[in-house]
Amino acid sequence: MIPGTSRDTPRKSSGTRSQGATSTPRRPNHNRGKHGGNRTTPTNPWIWGWHAVQAVIANPRRTIHQIMVTEQAAERLGLSEGRANLKIVAMNYIDTALPRGAAHQGVAVKAAPLQWPDLSQLADDADDNALILVLDQITDPHNVGAMLRLASAFGVTAMVMQTRKAPPMAGATAKVAVGCIETVPICLEVNIAQSLRTLQMFGYTVVGLAGETETTVADALSGGGRYALVMGAEGPGLRELVAKNCDVLARIPMQSGPIAGEAESLNVATAAGIALYEARR
């Protein structure tokens, strides 16, 4: 539930990691070391929806394997029939190729996951007022997609999720993100608590949103500098170990009370939007 909801200098790391493109991202190759090397995930997920597909096609960093569009959509996108990876099909053909109920708007692409620098490199290279958004086991693709839009709107340096608890970075997530999945760095980490400790070593103040505190999010984010904002899943909230690794827990003040007919909590994406606004205000 989201109610209103001394450090050593680390070695700078390098390397890139791929987005979690499928529902079950694989664990990283530990033979590559703690931070180096690419993270391998199954490839070729479908991305659909006008804005999401338009952003993928416009992204020179994407490796596109197939574009599946209606004739009318191909014209709108300015795609030539001679393009090798283009398949012009009827609307119902796309319906059958994608999950039931996918609001594809006549466009879909199959692409390899994006590659991003790892969290340590992103955190270290960021400016002095950097803001990183950490999601603790938030799995709903609509919430994650909405938070990618928020991350883009508020200039978030990176969004961090746990490998085995991240939704696919395609499908419904990409549709809701309306193209922001192409520009917001996404870091998949095995251990969120350890990731918070890493961010602290790079000078980030870690603020976890929780209801069981008197500190408001406005006060927690008022000091300036680098911040990592941690959001817990709706219902359970932050896990105990994750909360213990935050520098401060903060809440969003609410006028409603915990009684029937009044809002007991906020949707996690709504809470993230309020907290990100406070961080940038």
Image: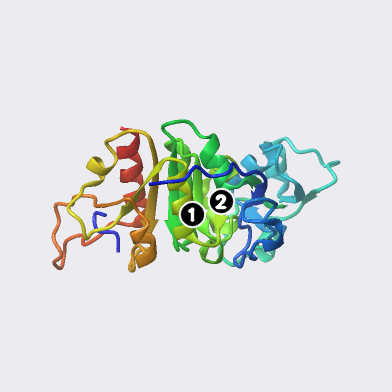
Real-space CA distance between mark 1 and mark 2, rounded to the nearest whole angstrom: 10 Å
Residue at horizontal 44 percent and vertical 56 percent from the top: 135
User: What type is the residue that disc 2 sits on?
Assistant: Cys
Question: Marks 1 and 2: CB-CB under 8 Å?
Answer: yes
Does 153 sit above or below residue 230? above
The one of 193 and 239 positioned closer to us in this rendering: 193
User: In the image, is 279 to the left or to the right of 213?
Assistant: right
User: What type is the residue that disc 1 sits on?
Assistant: Ser
Residue at horizontal 86 percent and vertical 41 percent from the top: 82
Residue at horizontal 35 percent and vertical 54 percent from the top: 246
Disc on res. 195: 1
Please report whichever mark, 1 or 2, sits nearer to the chain's N-terminal start: 2
In percent of width and height, residue 27 lies at: 63, 65
Figure quadrant of the C terminus: top left
In percent of width and height, residue 101 lies at: 55, 64
Q: Quadrant of residue 92?
A: bottom right
Disc 1 element: helix
The one of 263 and 243 positioned closer to us in this rendering: 243
Figure quadrant of the N terminus: bottom left
Q: Quadrant of residue 23?
A: bottom right
**Mark 2 crowd level (few <14, some 14–19, many ≥20, 10 Å Cα):** many
The one of 229 and 233 positioned closer to us in this rendering: 229
In percent of width and height, residue 130 lies at: 44, 36
Disc on res. 187: 2
Disc on res. 175: none
